[in-house]
Image (cartoon, rainbow, N blue to C red):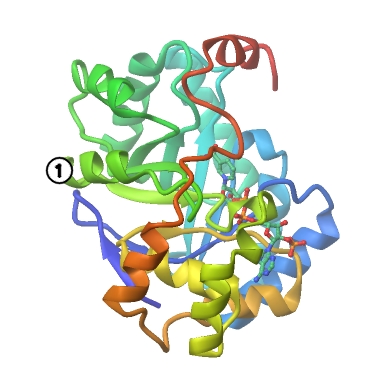
Amino acid sequence: MKQLKLNNGQMIPQLGLGVFKVQDANDLRRSVTDALKSGYRHFDTAAIYHNEAWLGEALAESGIKREELFITSKVWNSHTTYEDTITAFHESLKKLQTDYLDLYLIHWPSEGYNEKWRAMESLYAEGLIKSIGVSNFEKPHIEKLLTTAKVKPAIDQVETHPYFQQKKLHDYLKSLDIAHEAWGPLGQGKGHVLEDPTLAKIADAHNKSIAQIILRWHLQRDIVVIPKSIHTERIAQNIDVFDFTLTDEEMTLISMIDKNQRGSGDPNDTEWLKESLNRN
Ligand code: NDP
């Protein structure tokens, strides 16, 4: 598995398994077991997914050494203060049955994120988190964060797929040496990206699926990907993307199918962010 070096020197496996919307304990356990068998070592969850405990159980039962795993979780919007963030982190840690996280992210740029960051910096200084980062942060959010931050985020996890390529944000993150991580890397199975004719042609040429072409395209943009699936065959397929390379021409063709079309939550939707403070 290819690893990327983050701006603090820590390594991250460039491909992992996402577990958003896996709301059944058996599905989660099975998909994690399948993923480990296929070679995945990186898992992405969040407190708001309400499945950290199942992920923790599945990883503990696997018998794989903790240091071989890379576990990410995220602090939810309802925790707006320093103390709350520390408490939320320890709850996640307990559910995940571990004594440190590899990556902890601020889930959305909602109220109080500079304070949350201060708490994450403390946890990072204590060695309880190997890397700290943000999610759904755009340039203005990062600029505001950096006015008080002592530690620069290692990662920004944002919606990214061929119909929402985030070219400007990608360049901005690169200029700051903040790694770009894609959520919804397959377009969340929505918006017909998995039936795109340009991608279908490239897939035929490589004898791969469209999903594999998309994941390979992310990897060649130096993006970290965390595709989600609860199907054994797809889980295996999604990691089988290290034995071929897209040509420069194919990368250019894919860059041209961008529709700048968001599929889900918008970090600029301040009303939604306000409402999310009351959700748990
Ligand atoms: P993805 O882009 O990973 O798409 C998942 C969908 O694609 C599922 O419906 C899955 O179906 C389907 N799928 C997976 N592999 C294949 C394949 N090879 N062929 C065809 N269909 C496939 O969307 P997610 O929203 O799950 O994003 C990935 C991860 O990113 C999440 O699980 C979560 O960890 C993280 N995330 C973070 C967010 C944030 O705000 N920070 C927001 C959203 C996600 P099936 O499972 O039935 O196989």
Seen in the picture, residue 62 relative to 228 is either above or below; the reply is below
Seen in the picture, residue 120 relative to 65 is either above or below; the reply is above
- Mark 1: secondary structure: helix
Seen in the picture, residue 245 relative to 248 is either above or below; the reply is below
Front residue of this view, candidates 174 and 167 = 167
Front residue of this view, candidates 142 and 149 = 142
Ligand 1 found in image quarter: bottom right
- x and y, in percent, of residue 72 in the image: 49, 49
Is residue 128 visible to the viewer in this orientation of the structure?
A: no
Quadrant assignment for the N terminus: bottom left
Q: Residue at x 42, y 89 (%)?
A: 243
Q: Amino acid at mark 1?
A: Ser
Q: Is residue 15 left or right of residue 277?
A: left
Quadrant assignment for the C terminus: top right
Q: Residue at x 73, y 46 (%)?
A: 21
Front residue of this view, candidates 31 and 56 = 31
- How many numbered callouts? 1
- x and y, in percent, of residue 267 in the image: 48, 24
Is residue 81 visible to the viewer in this orientation of the structure?
A: yes
Give neighbour class at mark 1: few <14, some 14-19, many 20+ (Cα, 10 Å).
few
Q: Is residue 32 left or right of residue 148?
A: right
Q: Residue at x 21, y 23 (%)?
A: 146
The residue identified by callout 1 is 175
Front residue of this view, candidates 98 and 104 = 104
Ligand 1 within 8 Å of disc 1? The answer is no
Q: Residue at x 51, y 63 (%)?
A: 16
- Residue found farthest to the left: 175
- x and y, in percent, of residue 169 in the image: 30, 39
Seen in the picture, residue 105 relative to 68 is either above or below; the reply is above
Q: Is residue 92 left or right of residue 85?
A: right
- x and y, in percent, of residue 82 in the image: 41, 15
